[in-house]
């Protein structure tokens, strides 16, 4: 068997490079450290650049939350806080690797299960499941017909509905259903509060009950008691789609929706501009749950740089060095 090539090892020249900070970035950090707290203009002059070019020059240090530009001044993490910050980053990387390996291990039984078929005489066939797997056609027409020819509550998972061209047309159909006395319950991801507040406002004003949750795994519509529509495989595509009429499956999907509904929170108060949301509280809850920066960014609809900047700002505000300490201090202060 040929030898598997190893990835090139990073040259370690200090504690900081051992913890994942590049040598060039370490030199830049050492250059900035005595300038911490100084005006941006003075820092730019020392570095031989302009204030407008400073963010580009400090890109990696800003992205990783090591340096911050706010209120016209530069702040840099002191060395003990930087070491703690880099250790946190290494711990997050190790945790992500562990999660991926765990997911792979969990998938192994499916390799066996996917090939299993009952042998002759092991079961009595009573008939097929009631439903179809299909592709093509007009998804909007299908949803409209299902809603208008049924009577049950409408239960929606809408992880990305506001980005879809048919959103306004579906809103009209749902509005007619609600006006006729039916209930429509919809769950959106938290990022919709930032990306499409006007859509949530419009839905709520037409009588739909709207809640938000961190995230959800797929699109889904359940018409209580009769139908369910979801992608095959689960996700955010229109097709192939699975139309289910089997009562047990429709009931199980309704129960799944209700479990998410119970965890979701009601749409924040509406004003003429956008729903209000407690970014700091949501960020602290994500940190307390052990979420990684990338996951927090997706959940809250923020850029990765913004998340890292806010996390670093929270550490400074709370007077702590690590995310774990931030959680403890936030609880002590009654923020969580």
Image (cartoon, rainbow, N blue to C red):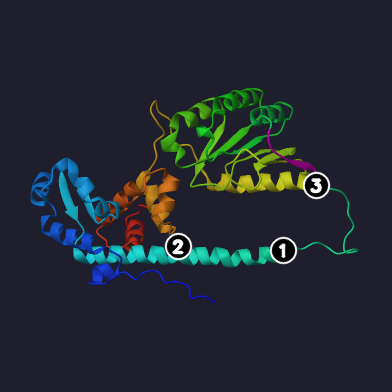
Mark 3 crowdedness (10 Å alpha carbons): few <14, some 14-19, many ≥20 = few
In this picture, residue 14 sits left or right of residue 156: left
Q: Residue 82's spot in the image, x, y percent? A: 24, 63
Name the element at disc 1.
Answer: helix
Of the two numbered discs 2 and 1 on the same chain, state the one appearing first in sequence. 2
> In the picture, which quadrant includes the N terminus?
bottom right
Pick the front one: 115 or 268: 115
Pick the front one: 115 or 331: 115
Of the two numbered discs 1 and 3 on the same chain, state the one appearing first in sequence. 1
Of the two numbered discs 3 and 2 on the same chain, state the one appearing first in sequence. 2
Q: Which mark is residue 113?
A: 1
Q: Residue 319's spot in the image, x, y percent? A: 24, 59
Q: Is residue 299 magenta?
A: no
Q: Which mark is residue 96?
A: 2
Q: Which mark is residue 158?
A: none
Cα distance between the residues tagged 3 and 2: 38 Å
Q: Nearer the viewer, mark 1 or mark 3?
A: 1
Cα distance between the residues tagged 1 and 3: 19 Å
Pick the front one: 128 or 197: 128
Q: Which residues are magenta?
A: 130-136
Mark 1 crowdedness (10 Å alpha carbons): few <14, some 14-19, many ≥20 = few
Residue found 66% across the figure and 47% down from its top: 255
Q: Which mark is residue 129?
A: 3
Among the 4 quarters of the image, the one containing residue 321? bottom left
Pick the front one: 72 or 277: 72
Answer yes or no: do the residues labelled 1 and 3 have beta carbons within 8 Å?
A: no
């Amino acid at each position: 068997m040929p030898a598997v090539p190893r990835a090139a090892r990073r040259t370690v020249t200090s504690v900081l490079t051992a913890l994942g900070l590049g040598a060039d970035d370490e030199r830049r950090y050492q250059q900035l450290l005595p300038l911490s707290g100084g005006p941006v203009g003075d820092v730019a002059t020392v570095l031989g650049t302009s204030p407008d070019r400073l963010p580009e020059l400090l890109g990696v240090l800003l992205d990783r939350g090591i340096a911050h530009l706010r209120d016209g001044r530069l702040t840099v993490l002191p060395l003990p806080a930087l070491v703690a910050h880099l250790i946190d980053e290494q711990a997050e990387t190790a945790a992500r690797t562990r999660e991926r390996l765990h997911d792979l291990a969990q998938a192994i039984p499916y390799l066996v299960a996917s090939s299993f078929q009952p042998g002759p005489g092991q079961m009595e066939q009573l008939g097929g499941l009631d439903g179809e797997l299909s592709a093509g056609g007009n998804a909007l027409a299908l949803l409209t017909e299902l809603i208008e020819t049924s009577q049950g509550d409408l239960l929606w998972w809408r992880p990305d509905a506001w980005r879809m061209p048919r959103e306004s047309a579906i809103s009209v159909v749902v509005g007619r259903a609600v006006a006729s006395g039916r209930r429509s319950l919809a769950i959106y991801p938290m990022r919709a509060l930032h990306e499409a507040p006007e859509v949530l406002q419009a839905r709520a004003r037409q009588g739909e009950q709207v809640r938000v949750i961190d995230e959800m795994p797929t699109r889904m519509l359940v018409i209580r008691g009769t139908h369910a529509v979801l992608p095959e495989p689960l996700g955010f595509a229109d097709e192939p789609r699975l139309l289910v009429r089997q009562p047990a499956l429709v009931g199980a999907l309704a129960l799944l929706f209700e479990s998410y509904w119970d965890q979701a929170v009601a749409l924040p108060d509406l004003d003429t501009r956008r729903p209000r949301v407690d970014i700091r509280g949501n960020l602290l809850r994500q940190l307390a749950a052990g979420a990684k920066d990338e996951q927090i960014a997706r959940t809250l609809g923020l850029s990765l740089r913004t998340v890292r900047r806010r996390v670093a700002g929270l550490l400074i505000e709370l007077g702590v060095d690590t995310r774990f300490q931030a959680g403890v201090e936030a609880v002590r202060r009654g923020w969580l």
